[in-house]
Amino acid sequence: MRTQLKLMMVVLAVALIPAAASAQPVKIGALFGVTGPIANFIPPIIDGANLAVKEINDNGGILGGRKLELVIGDSGCSPQAGVDAATKLVNVNNVVGIVGPMCSGPTIAAASSVMIPTGVPTISPTATSPDLTGLEDKDYIFRVIPSDNFQGKVMGKLVLDQGLKRVALTYANNDYAVGLATAFRNAYTALGGIITADQVHEEKKSSYRSELATLSRGGNPEALVLIAYAGSSGITIVKQSLENGFFERFIGPDGMRDDLLLEQIGGENMGKSFFTTPSSVASSAKEKFEKNFAAFSEHGVDKMFIKETYDAIMVMALAIEQAGSTDRRLVRKMIRAVATADGEVIEPGEWAKAKRLIAAHQAINYNGAAGEHEFDGNGDVAGVIGHYIVEGNKYKEIDILK
């Protein structure tokens, strides 16, 4: 009798192994700049990612009811930190894919050193460096935000359209700023604009007064085009420009459109300035996301990159569901299939609908909060750029530029 009981227990234990294995969560890595120059952007970005995870888990889960789990790593907006965090996500946490990194430098470094060699599908919500387009990535690296080749062209035209025919240019010595500065410079001068002084600067210095004196001295610049992260060099440059009378008008990209800039400088001192940021056009997908996010988070729906991050999580999860597997190679092959191919449109908040269609072997086409995400052969997408001004102590989008 005792022998039979032991045998039954062994059989039962063996029978439970597949169920226990299938109950293991499906892990996606989120490689965010939790510390470093864009740390102020991250709390609402994390809420955007967590909203996607919640919607998936509340509506049937993934791969037969398993939970989706987000494992957050900190790139620090630094290439080496990005490589270290990516290595842990891949080798220790065993994530299926990675959403991120946030900044261009760690995206290029981590992709080249970790994700491409190990075959980990990656979707960045925010990395905009033009260098990503030509990266030899074996089709593992995607992004849901347009390249800065596009933003630079739009910025160059916008500066001239605002009547600024002579500007000084300074940009940080990092992958993001160098690429965007090149695109801006080429577009602005090709359209007839004059750059009176053009300097690269190092990040995190306590003083930029000598550089600013040189930038402001010759050619009568009407404004300073400042391409940097506000939290790294941008705020210091703006503050010292105003304090010393070097410049009073600034033009910056998304890296400068940080709430910290207005908190530390004051909106009243930035009234003549304007900014560009990847944006999105009005759509039912955007409307659904904003409604759901407003109910989920205390952060405003206007915060940067929350839509792109939500979309990156959704595309990755849909690719996993479409693959029917956590095999990274199969997931990578499904990224375009769920977002670019013809099929039934899936919008934010429609995970249950997507699961039904995938189970019925019907094609889907995810249209996201930030755009339709039709990936080209390089894993890039098209997009639009928002023109922002400072009104009161807030940024206000006043136009969409294409």
Image: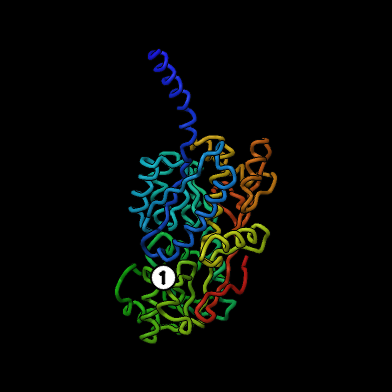
Query: Would residue 46 be seen by someone viewing this image from the given angle?
Result: yes
- Give percent across and percent down for residue 262: 45, 77
Q: Amino acid at mark 1?
A: Ala
Q: Is residue 147 or residue 124 the one in the foreground?
A: 124
Q: Which quadrant is home to the C terminus?
A: bottom right
Q: Quadrant of residue 74?
A: bottom left
Extreme bottom residue here?
Answer: 245
Q: Is residue 31 or residue 176 the one in the foreground?
A: 31
The residue positioned 45% from the left and 62% from the top of the image is: 43
Name the element at disc 1.
helix
Is 82 displayed left or right of 357 in the figure?
A: left
Extreme left residue here?
Answer: 206
Query: Would residue 192 be seen by someone viewing this image from the given angle?
Result: no
- Give percent across and percent down for residue 313: 53, 50
Is 59 displayed left or right of 185 in the figure?
A: right
Q: Which quadrant is home to the N terminus?
A: top left
Q: What residue is pinned by disc 1? A: 230
Bin the neighbour count of mark 1 within 10 Å (Cα to Cα): few under 14, some 14-19, many 20 and up: many
- Give percent across and percent down for residue 67: 51, 42
The residue positioned 39% from the left and 49% from the top of the image is: 110
Q: Is residue 359 or residue 376 the one in the foreground?
A: 359
Q: Quadrant of residue 173?
A: bottom left
Q: How is the image coloured?
A: rainbow
- Give percent across and percent down for residue 106: 39, 54
